Amino acid sequence: MLEKKIITDCTSCALAKRCLPSGIPVTDLYRFINIAHTNQTFASGDQLFKQGVKASHLYVVKTGSFKTQIINDFGDAHVNGFYLPGDILGLESMAGGITLNSCIAIEDSLACKITYRPLAALRKEFPNLSDLAVKIYSQALATTLETQNCLSIHSAAARLAQFLILFHRRTNQVTYRQIRLHLNMSRQDIASHLGIAVETVSRSFSKLIDAGCITKSGRIINIINTEALEEISRSTA
Amino acid sequence: MLEKKIITDCTSCALAKRCLPSGIPVTDLYRFINIAHTNQTFASGDQLFKQGVKASHLYVVKTGSFKTQIINDFGDAHVNGFYLPGDILGLESMAGGITLNSCIAIEDSLACKITYRPLAALRKEFPNLSDLAVKIYSQALATTLETQNCLSIHSAAARLAQFLILFHRRTNQVTYRQIRLHLNMSRQDIASHLGIAVETVSRSFSKLIDAGCITKSGRIINIINTEALEEISRSTA
DNA sequence: CGGCGGGTTGATCACTGTCAAGACCGGTGG
DNA sequence: CCACCGGTCTTGACAGTGATCAACCCGCCG
């Protein structure tokens, strides 16, 4: 109970310095906390928000991971992106006021929900928060640009290799000189995200293993040869 | 000469209400004009900025069109996006301070160059400009999301169809019930942008013509059956 | 034990990349 | 006015890659 109370507070959150509170003077932080619904719990498969409804909140991932997906007119889904602790969800829907995609928890997760309107008021009041907003948006654009480049790669193995590299950059989990990735999403999600078939994802993993780039066990990937992986990610064929 | 002077001024620019001046009170507009270098001319092929250098400016497209492209480590280029009048260039590079891509004029064009640092100062001073910045960024994110979805489409013809639909939404040139698109970029650029071969672009155009969706003459495309085009853009195969 | 979903592997076929050749278009020069 | 030339675009032939369908393995759960 006490512990729960502690993690609820932005002042003791490990992510605070990468998160919105970093744009607000400590003495005024209470005003941000007032408009934030911190540590909302989501079970794997739960939906944060649904595509095509009124957009009014941002979400900051605290623990776990999420995916966003768009359902097109014909009914099939495309996974747009994956979101890890520190990432902010819902940025792209603010201009139009309607959510452009759905967001689903990949595993049991925590996220902080922030109502947009009062946040905009704070942004006008605290210049640093305005700067931070621009920086966050700019960063988000840069990330989608990377994803876009990844999708434009022709070969499936190269695309997967690039995906692993990009995912690694965002997690930075290093143990024993090996680089260990926990891919919390299903192969199906990876396939949808990369625009290739599930079977091709499996086969591409096998290729990367045969090439000595990685080893894997289920959703745990070990990158054992970064250079070789980068080499494959650049290969045209 | 007189005419030149007129178009130089933001107060008489047709795009001003979609552009940054719309976030600034008319009485203070002179302060924005002071930091903007309006109507810079670029010949087809000229470079606005180069990948990997210090990023310090935004550019607003006034007339003509531009493309951005990334050169990867192996040396081949990928066209990230196309920019039309009213679009803003350089948003994604502000967070890192380094340009992530190069920008090149596709045809003879005009663009307004705005230094970032004083713009940030104005943003803090004028709340509406802060809101506008967020809206612009959010819109930009939404656009790249659309591009991403387009790239995840499997079939080349469907990808091209989706590209035409998205491009049309941004131009809205309607004449005589027909929808007329002027694709100012080369087939090579389209191919690079969509992640397919030039020849496949040509073949896909032919397929769209055979299907009765479009007619074309060089870089002029007429959409004669929007429903059919959308149908093809959704087809999995 | 059997069912079930997720993941891998195998076989086949359509699609697209590649290479090659030809068509078209605009510009230049005779 | 016409011939030539370069680049862009299109079309054809072929080979390679990945989508599809199918079977199988595995861990989980009733």
Image: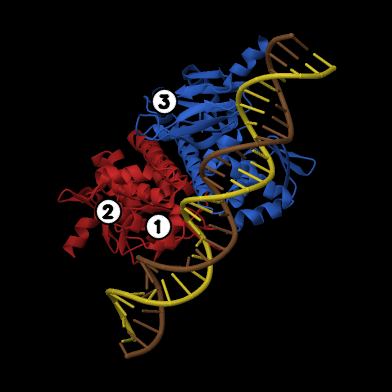
Chain colours: A red, B blue, C brown, D yellow
Between circles 2 and 3, the one closer to the viewer is: 2
Between circles 3 and 1, the one closer to the viewer is: 1
Outermost residue on the left side: it is: A176
Bin the neighbour count of mark 1 within 10 Å (Cα to Cα): few under 14, some 14-19, many 20 and up: many
Q: Confirm or deny contact between disc 2 and disc 3 (CB under 8 A).
A: no
Amino acid type, callout 3: Tyr
Secondary structure at numbered mark 3: helix
Amino acid type, callout 2: Ile
Task: Write down the chain letter for disc 2.
Answer: A
Give me the disc on residue B116.
3
Which corner quadrant of the image does residue B90 belong to? top left
Taking D2 as reference, is D22 above or below it? below
Secondary structure at numbered mark 2: strand
Q: Confirm or deny contact between disc 3 and disc 1 (CB under 8 A).
A: no
Taking A233 as reference, is C29 above or below it? above
Q: Which residue carries the number 1 mark?
A: A67
Q: Which residue carries the number 2 mark?
A: A214
